[in-house]
Image (cartoon, rainbow, N blue to C red):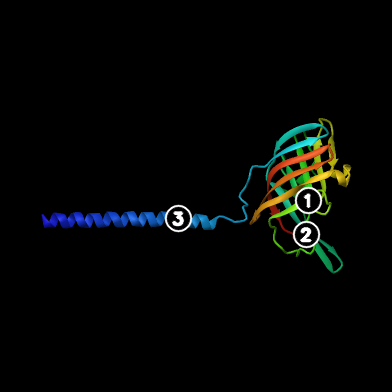
Amino acid sequence: MLKEKSKIKKLLIVICACLIFVACGGGAGTGSNSDSKSTSGAASVPSKLDITLYGKSRTVETKRGRFEVVVRRNGDLADSYYWLYLANVEISTEDDINKPLASPEDVRLSFELFRKPGTDISAPVTIESFDAKTGGGVGDTLIKTHDGSRVIDSYAHEAPLTERKGTVKITGANGDTVTGEVDVAYGDKIAVKGTFTAKILMPK
C-alpha cells in the first residue's frame, strides 16, 4: 500500500512539473512574440486607394509600391526627400515607373514628399506626416490613367495651393518595408484616399 502511495505521489509530482513546464514555455513564447513585434508598425497593410478624377471615382487595389529615398545636393549642402510610387500594375523596376499604361484599368500614382528641413540625409525612414496644403510637405502629385486610347496625366498643381488639403502619412517603417495612409484632395477635381505598403529604396 505504501509503495502504491509512493508511486502515486511521484506520478503527481511529475504531472505537476510537466504542467508548470508547459505553462512557463507558453508564457516565454508569448513574451518572445511580443518582443519581436516592431513598434514601428510596419507589417504589410492592404493597399487600396479610392481615387476621384474629374467627377469619376474608382477603387484601386495597388501592388507593393516603391518608396525611394532621394538625396539632393546643392554645393556643400544636401538634403533628402521621398518619391512614393503606387500602381495596380508592376512597378518593381525603374523602367516600370515610366512604362506606358496599356488599358483603362491601369493606374499609376506618384507623390513627392519633402522631409523636414535639417533632416540628416542618412536618417532612416520613420513615422512622419506630410501636409498637402503647405506645399512644403507633399510636393506634386501625379495620377496617370488610360482612357482607352491614350494616357492622361492629372497633376496636383492644377489646383491652387489654397485648394489643396490632406496628408500623406508614414505609419510604419521596418527593414525595407514602409506602410502609410493617403488622404489628399486638390480642389474638387482630384482626390486620393487609402492605405499602402511599399518597398524602401535607399540612395545608391
Question: Where does residue 198 sit, x and y in percent of width and height?
Answer: 68, 49
At label 1, which amino acid type do we have?
A: Asp
At label 2, which amino acid type do we have?
A: Lys
Pointer 3: what residue? 29
User: Alpha carbon of mark 3 to alpha carbon of mark 2: how far?
Assistant: 40 Å
Q: Quadrant of residue 63?
A: top right
Any part of residue 202 in sight: yes
The correct choice, above or below, for 141 with respect to 82 in the image is above
Other-residue count near label 1 (Cα within 10 Å), few / some / many at <14 / 14–19 / ≥20 = many
Question: Where does residue 167 sit, x and y in percent of width and height?
Answer: 76, 48
User: Alpha carbon of mark 1 to alpha carbon of mark 3: how far?
Assistant: 41 Å
Dot 3 and dot 2 residues touching (CB under 8 Å): no
The correct choice, above or below, for 160 with respect to 129 in the image is above
Q: Which one is earlier in the sequence, the residue at label 1 or at label 3?
A: 3
At label 3, which amino acid type do we have?
A: Gly
Pointer 2: what residue? 116
Q: Which residue does the image show at 80% across and 61% down from the upper left?
A: 117
Label at residue 131: 1
- Furthest-bottom residue in view? 76
